[in-house]
Each structure stands twice: as structure tokens, then as C-alpha cells.
């Protein structure tokens, strides 16, 4: 018996060595594709931030441009208003000049009539006067006419000077407004140039972002294909290893049958296949339900890839190994919730010998439990790192018990 155990241990080492190599190879494949994916994700994040920053700057510049255009419109309206006021001042100046000229011509006529044509001396005015009062009135009238004309001419001249001053002020204000308008126009031109440059930069960044996303998608697809290829390779290796193990176990059992009793032969065969599963007997209980093992396996395989959560009971959101088994059989109306751990599941249903293992049977290990999927593989909630899988061989650990509940 000790000799057989030593053989089993050596065989287990021979079997697990290539399996470990396969796992390490899978890890190297995944690591190789993760680095480009991580670099691509970082590049996409950086380019997205650059694009957003450029868009924010463009929006800010456009808002500033709207303010400048509004200021230009306001200044243009003021310039137009000042121009109208200047034109009115020029018209007022022209009117004042015309009035001044008209008054001057009228005064000349009166002066000519009074002095040039008449040119009467004071003596003549005195002689022709009816009395002294009449004399004073005539002299006073002459002086009053002259004084009135003089005052009117001075008034027109003052008005003209005042209007000219107003015109000069308006022209100065208009020049200031024109200078402001020119400055705003220069800012508008510079801002338009800046916006155009930022738009070109954003187009370049967006093009680079689209290219990075395309490459990331291609890299993700390569990763997916690499993972699928690695899983397929592992499944094939596991199936081949399980088949080889069964063939070697059968060969050892046949050899043992020739050299020992049937009891020893049975014990040796069971030990080589499932170590301490069998007590020397052969157990293959008849079905107690109309549920087929293939139905159970097919349903369980739907959740491959979902997460492993310790203590979880959700086939989609996450479960652990015993929760996975309990929830799969619950779907078929089989309640195993009273045995919600791997050790308790060793006593559910009926006992099965390793050589009679069928799809749908519950395979119990030390601290773990799974469902036999056929072809030497199990479907299981494996670990937090791998989640729910269906590619490991049934002999990935020492089998403690095999139970049939269907």
C-alpha cells in the first residue's frame, strides 16, 4: 500500500508539473498583453484630457471673442453718434458764420446810410433837430444802432468759437473711440488666430485619440483571442492528462490484479485514481431524478467567467465554491443549502467510486468542491483571481469524496 502511495505521489508530481508550466505560460501570455493595454489606456486618458482642455480653452476664447465683438459694436455706435454730433456742430458753425456775415452786411448798409451817405456832423444834427431833446434822441439812436450791431457781431463770433470748441472736443472723443476700436479689432484678429490654432490642435489630438482607441480595441481583441487560445490549450492538455492518468491507472490496476487478490486490486486502483475516495468497493448509484448530468453541466457552464466572492450565493454577481454548487443544483429544484460548505457536501446524496464518475457528480476536495463536467474536467468557482472556470482536471487536487444527487 505504501509502495502504491509513493507511485501515486510521483505520478501526481509528473502530472502537475506540466499543468503548472501551462499555468505559468498562460500568465506570461496575459502579462504580455496587459502592458500594451495599460499603456494604451494611459495614452487614451492623456489624449482625452488634452482634448477636453483644448475644448475648454476654445469655449473660453469664443466667450471672450463675443465680448470683444459686443464692445466693438458699442464703440462703433458711439463713433457713429459722435460723427452725427460733429456734422451738427459743423452745420451750427456754418449757420453762425452765415448769420454773422448777414449781420455784418446789414451793419455796413446802416453805417453807410448813416455815415457814408449822410455823414452829418453833430452841428448839422443839432441844427436840424426840433429841439435839444430831439438832438439827444438822434445822437442816442445812432450810437444805439452801432452798439447793437457790435454786440450782435460779438455774439455771433462767440457762438461760432463755442461751437468750434465743441466740434474739437467731439473730434477728439471720436479719435479716442477709433483708437479703442482699432485695439479691439487687433485683439479680435489675434483671438481668431488663437482659436483657429487651438481647433487645429484639437483636431490633431482627436485624431490621435481615435487612433489610440482603435489600437486599444485591437489590443483588447488580441488579448481576448490569446486568452481563448490559452484556455483551449489548457483544456486540451487537461483532457489529455486526465485520459493518460485513467489509462495508467487502468494499467496499474490490471497489473495489480495479476499479482494480488481482487480486494488488493480494487484498493490499488481506487487509490491510484482518487487516493482515499474508495474503501475498496465499487459505488455507482442509480439516478433518483429525471435530471441528466449534462443538463447540470450545461447550466453551470453559463456562468463561467463570473467572479468568485467568498461567502457569495449569486451565480452572476459572485459566489464561492460551495455557493456555486448549491446554487446550480437549486436551479433544478435540489436543495443543498443545509450543506453550505465543502466539508458538509461530502455527505449529500449517494457515494460514487472514482471509476464510475459521471458528469453532474459533486467532487469534494479538502477545502474545495466542484461539479464534474466530463472529459476529465470540472466546472467550479475556483478563486478570486480566476472566478468561475471549467478548464481544470478533476485530479487538480486530492479527491476526498464523490457524491451523486441526481
Image: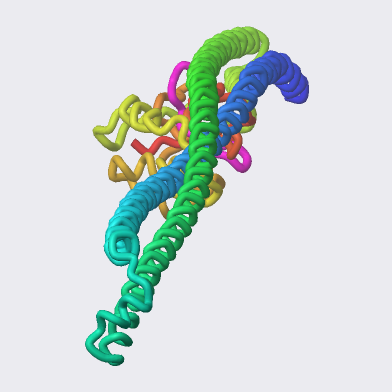
User: How far across and how far down the image is residue 3, in percent?
Assistant: 77, 20
> Going 55% across and 23% down the picture, which residue do you hit?
392
What is the magenta range? Answer: 363-378
> Going 73% across and 19% down the picture, which residue do you hit?
13
User: How far across and how far down the image is residue 215, in percent?
Assistant: 53, 16
Question: Can residue 213 be seen at all in this image of the molecule?
Answer: no
User: How far across and how far down the image is residue 278, in percent?
Assistant: 57, 31
In which quadrant of the rendered view does residue 141 lie?
A: bottom left
Pick whichever, 55 or 367, lies toward us. 55
Pick whichever, 55 or 336, lies toward us. 55
Pick whichever, 120 or 16, lies toward us. 120
> In terms of secondary structure, what is the magenta stretch mainly?
strand
Quadrant in which the N terminus is drawn:
top right
In which quadrant of the rendered view does residue 18 lie?
A: top right
> Going 51% across and 23% down the picture, which residue do you hit?
200
Quadrant in which the C terminus is drawn:
top left
Question: In the rendered structure, does residue 297 fall within the stretch colored magenta?
Answer: no
Q: Is residue 374 left or right of residue 243?
A: left
User: How far across and how far down the image is residue 220, in percent?
Assistant: 52, 20
> Going 55% across and 48% down the picture, which residue do you hit?
310
Question: Can residue 276 be seen at all in this image of the molecule?
Answer: yes
Question: In the rendered structure, does residue 369 fall within the stretch colored magenta?
Answer: yes
Amino acid at each position: 500500500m505504501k509502495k502504491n502511495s509513493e507511485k501515486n505521489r510521483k505520478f501526481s508530481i509528473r502530472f502537475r508539473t506540466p499543468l503548472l508550466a501551462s499555468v505559468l505560460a498562460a500568465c506570461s501570455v496575459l502579462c504580455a498583453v496587459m502592458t500594451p493595454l495599460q499603456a494604451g489606456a494611459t495614452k487614451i486618458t492623456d489624449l482625452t484630457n488634452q482634448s477636453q482642455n483644448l475644448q475648454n480653452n476654445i469655449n473660453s476664447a469664443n466667450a471672450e471673442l463675443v465680448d470683444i465683438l459686443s464692445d466693438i459694436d458699442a464703440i462703433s455706435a458711439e463713433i457713429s453718434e459722435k460723427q452725427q454730433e460733429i456734422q451738427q456742430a459743423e452745420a451750427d458753425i456754418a449757420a453762425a458764420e452765415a448769420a454773422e456775415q448777414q449781420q455784418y452786411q446789414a451793419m455796413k448798409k446802416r453805417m453807410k446810410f448813416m455815415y457814408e451817405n449822410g455823414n452829418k456832423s453833430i452841428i448839422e444834427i443839432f441844427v436840424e433837430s426840433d429841439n435839444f431833446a430831439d438832438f439827444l434822441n438822434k445822437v442816442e439812436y445812432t450810437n444805439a444802432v452801432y452798439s447793437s450791431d457790435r454786440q450782435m457781431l460779438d455774439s455771433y463770433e462767440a457762438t461760432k468759437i463755442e461751437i468750434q470748441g465743441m466740434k474739437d472736443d467731439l473730434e477728439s472723443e471720436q479719435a479716442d473711440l477709433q483708437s479703442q476700436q482699432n485695439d479691439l479689432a487687433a485683439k479680435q484678429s489675434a483671438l481668431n488666430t488663437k482659436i483657429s490654432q487651438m481647433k487645429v490642435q484639437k483636431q490633431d489630438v482627436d485624431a490621435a485619440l481615435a487612433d489610440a482607441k482603435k489600437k486599444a480595441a485591437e489590443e483588447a481583441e488580441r488579448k481576448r483571442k490569446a486568452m481563448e487560445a490559452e484556455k483551449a490549450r489548457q483544456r486540451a492538455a487537461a483532457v489529455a492528462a486526465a485520459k493518460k492518468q485513467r489509462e495508467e491507472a487502468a494499467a496499474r490496476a490490471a497489473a495489480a490484479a495479476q499479482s494480488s487478490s481482487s480486494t488488493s486490486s480494487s484498493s490499488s486502483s481506487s487509490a491510484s485514481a482518487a487516493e482515499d475516495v474508495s474503501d475498496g468497493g465499487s459505488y455507482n448509484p442509480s439516478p433518483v431524478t429525471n435530471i441528466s448530468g449534462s443538463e447540470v453541466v450545461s447550466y453551470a457552464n453559463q456562468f463561467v467567467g463570473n467572479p468568485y466572492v467568498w461567502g457569495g450565493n449569486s451565480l452572476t454577481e459572485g459566489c464561492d465554491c460551495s455557493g456555486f454548487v448549491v446554487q446550480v443544483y437549486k436551479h433544478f429544484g435540489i436543495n443543498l443549502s443545509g450543506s453550505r460548505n465543502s466539508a458538509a457536501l461530502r455527505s449529500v446524496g449517494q457515494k460514487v467510486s472514482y471509476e464510475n464518475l459521471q458528469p453532474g457528480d459533486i467532487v469534494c476536495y479538502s477545502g474545495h468542491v466542484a461539479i464534474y463536467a466530463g472529459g476529465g474536467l470540472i466546472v467550479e468557482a475556483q478563486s478570486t483571481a480566476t472566478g468561475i472556470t471549467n478548464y481544470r482536471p478533476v485530479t487538480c487536487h486530492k479527491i476526498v469524496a464523490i457524491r451523486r444527487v441526481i
